[in-house]
Image: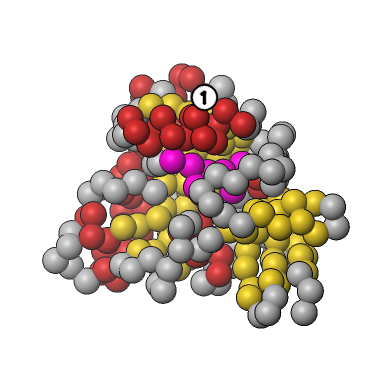
Amino acid sequence: MPLRVKPHSSFDGIYQLKIPPNENKLATKNMTPGISFYGEKLVTFGKIEYRVWDAFRSKLAAAILNGINFMPIKPNQSILYLGAASGTTPSHISDIVGQNGHVYCIEFAPRSIRDLISNVCVHRTNMSPFMEDARFPEKYAAFIPKRVDVIYSDVAQPEQARIISDNADYLLKKNGYVLLAVKAPSIDVTKNPKSIFKQEAKILKNRGFKVKEIIDLEPYDKAHAMILALK
């Protein structure tokens, strides 16, 4: 079977790949042809280059493969990314939103922000890195010119739902969405992960969100879930 690429059946800016002999993968259209950011495979189909999206390296890809029903991240949108690390998932979001969209990347660790800037952001005009702590959105909110369409959070902190909610108060548009990657061991290693997922969803509800989906991320990430909520 030859390589085949087609648009995702439900989500704009995301593609489905069939790689010989019989692999099914996700991909995004590479904004910077020829450049791989974390060792991901680059494939060309119909004169267009795509980046294979590794669900074992990206919780967002894992949520898509595990059946999330709605994807708020779309072409031309502005995204606030909390916990951008070295840029694996942000780089794919950059592909999705395209040149008319933007990804504002918040990362606190010096080594990670250095890698994010030197390996990813330097190649892309639709990404802005900030070396800041996501727990204090008041420190960087003034540098983001307008409220964003979506906030994505992947931070290893105990109060994950509170952090994304505080950022939403400052920076999320009305009727905007949040995607919260919940890391249960970072909150309480002694509790059942499913009870922690429900606990974080309840915090979001108490902060005025409508929780739409809770997607378990196994087998790609153990004791992790993705919560999709509407403000």
Looking at the picture, how far across and down is residue 46, in whole percent?
Answer: 85, 57
Q: Residue at x 14, y 66 (%)?
A: 190
Residue located farthest toward the left when viewing the structure as drawn: 190
Up-down relation of residue 27 to residue 33 (above or below): below
Task: Describe the colour scheme in one phrase.
Answer: secondary structure
Q: Residue at x 38, y 27 (%)?
A: 131
Looking at the picture, how far across and down is residue 187, in whole percent?
Answer: 22, 55
Magenta stretch: includes residue 26: no
Magenta stretch: includes residue 89: yes
Q: Amino acid at mark 1?
A: Ile
Residue 182, image quadrant: bottom left
Residue located farthest toward the right when viewing the structure as drawn: 46
Question: Judging from the image, what secondary structure is the residue with disc 1 in?
Answer: loop
Residue topped by disc 1: 144
Q: Is residue 13 visible?
A: no
Q: Which residues are magenta?
A: 86-94
Q: Residue at x 27, y 68 (%)?
A: 193
Q: Is residue 191 visible?
A: yes
Looking at the picture, how far across and down is residue 177, in whole percent?
Answer: 53, 48
Characterize the magenta stretch by its predominant secondary structure: helix
Disc tally is 1
Up-down relation of residue 79 to residue 184 (above or below): above
Residue located farthest toward the top when viewing the structure as drawn: 142
Q: Crowding near pointer 1: few (<14 within 10 Å), some, many (20+)?
A: few
Looking at the picture, how far across and down is residue 30, in whole percent?
Answer: 69, 46
Up-down relation of residue 201 to residue 219 (above or below): above
